[in-house]
Amino acid sequence: MIIDFVKKIPGFIFKYKFTILCLLYFCIISILATYSNLEGRISKPAIATALSFFFILNIIAKMKYSSIFSVVFAILISIDSYFAFVYSTSITSGILGSIFETNAAEAKEVLTDALFKAIIILGITLLLIFQSKKELKPINFSIKKSLAVFLIYSCLFIPGILYRKITINEVRMGDFAMFPLNTVQLLTAQHFPLIYNDCVTYLVYRDEMSKLNSYKTSERVLPEGIVLENTELAPEKIYYIIGESSWRNHYSLYGYSKKTTPFLDSLNAASPNNIKYYDGIAPAPFTRDATRILLSFATPTDINPFFREKSIIDLAHHAGYETLWISNQAQLDFNGSYIGYVAMNANYNFFNTKTSENDLDLLPVIADRKKQGKKQFIIIHLTGSHLSYSERFDEIDVAAIAGGNDQITQYDRTIHHTDRVLRGIYNEMQKDSCSVLYYIPDHSEIIGLGHGFPNQGTSQFEVPIIVINNKAAEIETIVDKYIDPETSLINGSSSIYILSEYLGYSVSKENVEKSIIDGRYILHGDGKIYKYDTVK
């Protein structure tokens, strides 16, 4: 009997080869999506979930309009497959938010780079699912039976595993009490990455958006220990420049071999007392998460201050400044993103509508909106060095940075272009009675890949922080207080404290120390909080 059974195995494998390949494909996706998240371990529930999709395949094979459902199922699987194979991760709320909140032009550029891989993955997925459908259609296993098994698995087994994972860990139980959806999402990403995680992640994202809906009408307060005191010494103009995807290791100001920042280099050589630069780290590798922290008292470990405490725009208003938001990124829905909710509170908003998205286009807008003798807080949001790099520089940058069209050379040209933008803003500063420029990119970049991906090193966090002083009093020592004595780094999460002091607020010693401690952590692309010195 055993011999007969063994003899039938090759025939069974051949008969259902595409179904077997399909299930193997689901298992590989699950392993790749969770392997790094689990530090090299393979999740048994993730494998069991991948195999349970046999019942979905069988249901689809026997349904009316099965082709339509096959395509929908293939698209959902392909999304998970893309992130698993290309980035070794599953969908997170950060990724989902970046997809929904990215403007159309930027999305088009990113999709252009990803399109080839995405088409291949979708093609493979469609082939396997459609061929599996043909194999399963004749078998004597009804839709009702498949549906019953799948529902039992989904409604009993998965909740049971999640409950056990939460209750066996006291820290996780505490996290669940404070952030139930987020805790469930992190566990789902680790153990149920296929489709289930996508659904839970979407719920987390919608929960974030529902909190944002109350932002417009909420009464935000000053944190304890921050008091408006010294407005007379505050500079007339403060330029808060938020860069994009800019890696400090590719700034010649920081020692890079190519002359990518000739303006900053020359200023540092001629007037070293007027420019200070620091080794910064981004609080998060996604724009939506990083800017939320750069614009508020939120930290990598606590999002709640964004909703209950004053933003940088609120602080500037309270200190008597007119606020301007000047962005080279297409206008976002004010009701649909963290950036949008802060930007809508500015006295003036400008979003570049030109298709070129050249950061130099912002210089005339800045010059036009400046008012001599008036206190103004000007936030300038650049496109910087975001993919696609070839869209972020011009012939002047090509002439300055020789070489071919490889990714590194193109990236270096985008840095050179940003240096020209900073020179243009510096020239505007010379018309002010006194002013200060504070420049920090939202995050850095893995050249050629992008940002937001776990287990891809620290380059996506390594940002420059550059301060230029134009006759402003007593600002040189402000930033130095926020340098972590253990690492000599400054987290971007300290930016709001630094800018608060520029605006004339006093910051208590306790808040300075808190900022340094908070700055030892980052919120990574997988939605988890890491101590920065453990990031791999």
Image (cartoon, grey):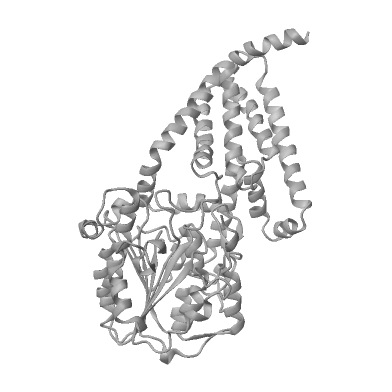
Furthest-front residue in this view: 257
Q: Say which residue appears at 49% left-offset and 34% top-offset.
A: 75
Q: Which one is nearer the viewer's eye here, 223 or 393?
A: 393
Q: Image check: 264 left or right of 120?
A: left
Q: Image check: 464 left or right of 31?
A: left
Q: Which one is nearer the viewer's eye here, 251 or 505?
A: 251
- The image quadrant of residue 346 is bottom left
Q: Position of residue 441 (x, y in %)?
A: 42, 65
Q: Which one is nearer the viewer's eye here, 464 or 384?
A: 464
Q: Say which residue appears at 58% left-offset and 34% top-offset.
A: 28
Q: Quadrant of the N terminus?
A: top right
Q: Say which residue appears at 47% left-offset and 83% top-offset.
A: 478
Can I make out residue 344 in this image? Answer: no
Q: Position of residue 45 (x, y in %)?
A: 70, 38
Q: Position of residue 342 (x, y in %)?
A: 46, 68
**Rendered view: 234 above or below 78:** below
Q: Image check: 148 left or right of 262?
A: right
Can I make out residue 428 in this image? Answer: yes
Q: Position of residue 87 (x, y in %)?
A: 50, 45
Q: Image check: 219 left or right of 276?
A: right
Q: Which one is nearer the viewer's eye here, 374 or 442?
A: 442
Number of numbered discs visible in the structure rendering: 0
- The image quadrant of residue 31 is top right
Q: Say which residue appears at 53% left-offset and 25% top-offset.
A: 129
**Rendered view: 220 above or below 154:** below
Q: Quadrant of the C terminus?
A: bottom right
